[in-house]
Image: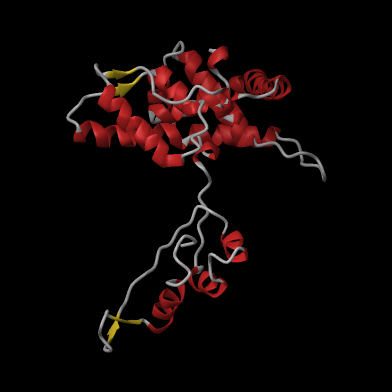
Amino acid sequence: IAEMPVSLQPKLLRVLQERVYYRVGSDKPQEVDFRLLSSTNRSPFEAIKDGSLREDLYYRINTIEIKIPPLRDRMDDVPMLAEHFLQIYTEKYKKNCEFSERAYDQMLNYSWRGNVRELQHVIERAILLSKSGKITELNIPKNLDNSISYINFTKEERSNNNTAAGESETEIEKNGSSRLSQKELSGEELFDEVGKFIVEKLPEPEDGAEQKDVFNSIENSVVLAALKRTNGNKQAAANLLGLYRPRLYGMIKRHNLEEKI
């Protein structure tokens, strides 16, 4: 919407207000009933400030605003989107292809400055150039500036994350495994007991203290346990956890679990 010519914006505003428009060369009003969905890749307030977006139009169309973060800030979506585009283009070009782990690693270590459109074109190009059923490498820049930030943790951050995960795992092994194993639990009852045990062990939050993401630590420990149980077989671990395999790859990368398997 911020790229619409300024001369057209009052006309759109009038249609939105009056719900009528005039055909070219006609003076007879045409009633219209529609819902408007508009988007922009820049800040609306910057566009208003530099005069490329009318302020009254912005407030007229801004009934519900949805902010979609860039793809580099939601890397868990990358493997799932890649699989989606893989399905589309394998059907379109009558090919049978799948991604290798190296290809997933490339996806998760790239910042995707062009967002979903760039990912889509990279997948389409990979399918077109594939000479076998396995896409082993993607044709994306190898510039180190494009590496995604959350994979390049500092040593201190990695140490903190690993220590937290280790503490959670050890705590459950020492204090909880015997108690939980005494009960023959399965399904929802098992998850209820594990959830109660974890929450009971959490310290009371202190004012001003840094908050810890409990679910992040739980995810880390569960994924690591599944990988250890399956001897590092990612497909088997994904099946065990009921996960879509690309989603598991995203979790492994986010928690830096490759070197722990």
Residue in the image at 45% along x and 66% along y: 5
Residue 182 is at least partly visible in this image? no
Q: Looking at this rendering, what residue extends furthest in the top direction?
A: 231
The answer to whether residue 25 is left or right of residue 193 is: left
Residue 54: give x, y in percent of width and height: 54, 71
Above or below, comparing residue 226 to residue 215 in the picture: above
Q: How many numbered discs?
A: 0
Q: Looking at this rendering, what residue extends furthest in the bottom direction?
A: 27
Say which quarter of the image contains residue 154. Answer: top right
The answer to whether residue 8 is left or right of residue 200 is: left
Residue 141 is at least partly visible in this image? yes
Residue in the image at 46% along x and 10% along y: 231
Residue 236: give x, y in percent of width and height: 38, 18
Residue in the image at 23% along x and 31% along y: 90
Residue 232: give x, y in percent of width and height: 46, 13
Residues 175 and 59: in front is 59
Q: Looking at this rendering, what residue extends furthest in the left direction?
A: 94
The colour scheme used here is secondary structure
Residues 24 and 84: in front is 24
Residue 134: give x, y in percent of width and height: 29, 18
Residues 222 and 56: in front is 56
